[in-house]
Image: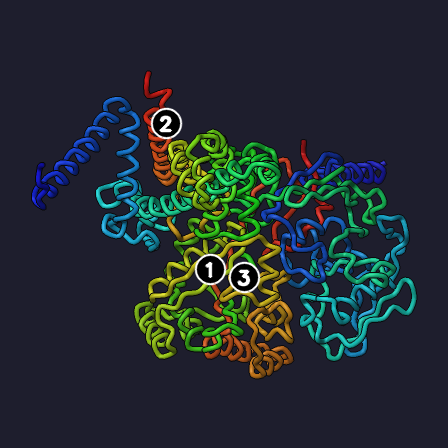
Amino acid sequence: MTAITPGSVTSAASADTAWRRRTLAGTVLGFCRRHPLGAIGFVIILIICLAGGLADWLAPFDPEENDFSTMMQAPDWIHVLGTDQFGRDIFSRLVFGARTAMIVGFGAAVGGGVIGLILGVTSAYFGGWFDLVFQRVLDVLMAFPLIILALAVVSVFGTGVFNVIIAITIPLVPRCGRVVRASALAVREVPYVDAARALGFGHTRIVFHHMIPNVLAPFLILLSAFVGQAILAEASLSYLGLGVQEPVPAWGLMLQGSAEDYATTAPWIAIFPGLAIVITVLAFSLFGDALRDAIDPKLRTR
Amino acid sequence: MNIRTGLWTLGVALAASIATAQAGAPTPKRGGTLTYLIPADAPPSFDGHRETTFATVHTVAPYYSVLIRVPPDDPSSTTEFVCDLCTEMPKPTDGGKTYTFKIRPDVKWHDGSKLTAQDVATSWNMIVFPPKGVTSARVSYYSMVDKIEAPDDSTVVFHLKYATTAFLPALADPFTWIYKKEILDKDPHWYEKNIMGSGPFKFVSYEVGQSIKGVRNPDYYHKGQPYLDAIEGIFTPKQSVRTDALRADRAAIEFRGLPPSARDQLEKELGDKITVQDSDWNCGNVLTPNQRHKPFDDVRVRRALALAIDQWHGAPALAKIATVRTVGGIVFPGSPLAATKEELQQIAGYWPDIEKSRAEAKRLLKEAGAEGLKFELLNRNVDQPYKFVGTWVIGEWKKIGLNVEQKVVPTGPWFQNMRAGTFDVAMEANCQSVVNPVLDTGKYLPGKIFPDNYGGYDDQTSIDLYNKMQYETDPKKQRADMRAYEKHTLDEMAHEIVLPYWYRIVLARSYVKGWKISPSHYLNQDLSNIWLDK
């Protein structure tokens, strides 16, 4: 018999942790090697998240402070991306705008995704009339393009960051619910769900412990796509004057109104926020595609 | 022979001179459709008696008549008024206390029935003496009116309590449309949602937030007018869309005013295809703290809000990007009753030393226990200049540690919020028609006297000071009284904060003829004298 000592347990545990660490590193490296565009997307997302999180330290100027002595100044060493019509530093507004984009993007995507996940799995699990009615409700909601539904919601709730998150969350719910339900329908039929039911587990436990974890792969892919969509929707709403309001720094808002008026005389006012939106949405799109390829077993074998 | 030759020569010379004169003023051409831009999302209602916004005037004025008006060919005049529905301007009798108007016999409503003096008298009674439940926005303008009557179908008589020169300018107010008595008797609110007048154009259709269309009224009583076959007003709250529409000739004119940047851009791109008319503007943004909400019931907080704003440096900078220009008090700058720069600099919000002013603002906030105050600025979803000025003001307030969020809403909800008192501080505007300081400053009276004051305060001193100024006939004394009223309103009580006055720049495609600018975007909007040189 081999005696198990505390030391041997500790060393076995650290060996396990090291293995896991190596595996995680290997997974990341493998992901980067197989999906270079996705990796670039991920790095950009990371940079934008850091910029938003560290905006207070990164921004050289107060993004909301008017300075009429520097109105519409072209990019130079002091204002690297120039200034807008109120003399506000565009770089500082972009950095703080990243925070707004991330708050709205992740807030709406996570909110819409999680609600959609729970409703989609629940609908698949119960089936019958509940599923039928719920799917028709989703049909109605999905009949509206995301931005139209968001516009309708904003017109009811009003403008502002929180209301914009709600406005984008609502149209994302059916989009997530529909996809997740399709995966959950397959999971519902597998033996371990029957076994859980036979053991007398409650509906909540079966849905949350046995079904939701098994549809997380498509959910995570959706989530990455939703963040990009939500950022774009926020920019669109702000551009239409229905999102966040001045002087809050937000990329869509920076493109609104005066940016169009000064597009020819001070093009940097429109170019840089436009670029920020394009790069961010592209990054989420690239990362989402790569994540799908990496997680989907059918695509993984190619 | 010599006489005949002389007469013949004289006749030829006379004919030549007439022809020359006519060549100088081109003859208006008939026909065409005028597409014009209305820089708002929609009017809050169609009722001119109730509303105070250009969104209503620009939308609905072409469908209505008024009793008298400023001359359409000289709308800048502040002293000359001409008849619209009356036959001639009356001379006052009874020591200046009675005005008798004869009404034209040839005026028809758009439904074909005849317009009579009864319609005119009923409309004016609704404006001056609104019954309970009916809102008349400018009721304080007519405090001099004692009685209005129509002794027969062609005569309307205004009896005044006292003689005043303020009466005729008030009577020429462009919102005072004449409505049909029969309709008003049935439902005094009918005109809020419907249009039926006797103006140069007949209403055809209205799509909320999209457009309003009208066609020429063939029975219009000013013979030969209107020159246009049809009109279409397009609602375009976004400034860039309006600029693009003018550039692409999708619209011919925008009557309210565009900023200097749009003017410069379109002049550069379109050259002689665009014409520009500009003017000082009897209009300016006003910040109204809601005194029903704490801590805005505290005069120290209101004074602090005023003291934080650097008007003297802000106005010239804003003038480069927005339709604002001149720093002024409660009276239109340039008027004999307006404050001089030195007089203004004695008032909170106009101090020449902004650092000292902001230090005082911070001290007042601390004293009132409102340091770092967080509140909402209610603003209107109109780019120029509301949102520009709103963004500027929030930046100024931030400099004294205030945390202000801008709530931008369409015109309808903007009015609803102000009328319901559901706001902290509102960005509104005091825009008037004929320059008439005595009446224009009625805006700063408490709401019980001036219904369109949304500050939610009562102040008898303010009313007394205003009345003293209003009844004063000596210009020097009246000016002094105006200063006292201004000081009380802006400085001692800080009921309102007057921001820089606007500057009006109207751009039109060069083929639009016949329309002339005035210091008010409310005046001259029935479009009857516009023609297209195409």
Nearest to the observer: residue A75 or residue A193: A193
Discs 2, 3 touching: Cβ within 8 Å = no
Disc assigned to residue A292: 2
Disc assigned to residue B326: 1
Question: How has the structure been colored for display?
Answer: rainbow
Q: The residue under label 2 is which amino acid type?
A: Arg
- Residue in the image at 80% along x and 39% along y: B11
What secondary structure is marked by label 1?
A: strand
Q: Nearer the viewer, mark 2 or mark 3?
A: 2
Q: Is residue A261 visible?
A: no
Q: Sequence order check: which comes first, mark 1 or mark 3? A: 1
* Picture coordinates of residue A197, whole percent (x, y): 47, 40
Q: Which residue is mark 3?
A: B428
What secondary structure is marked by label 2?
A: helix
What is the number of callouts on the image?
Answer: 3
In the visual, does B345 lie left or right of B162?
left
Q: Chain of mark 2?
A: A
Q: Is residue B289 visible?
A: yes
**Marks 2 and 3, Cα distance to the nearest angstrom?**
52 Å
- Residue in the image at 50% along x and 72% along y: B293
* Picture coordinates of residue B315, whole percent (x, y): 42, 58
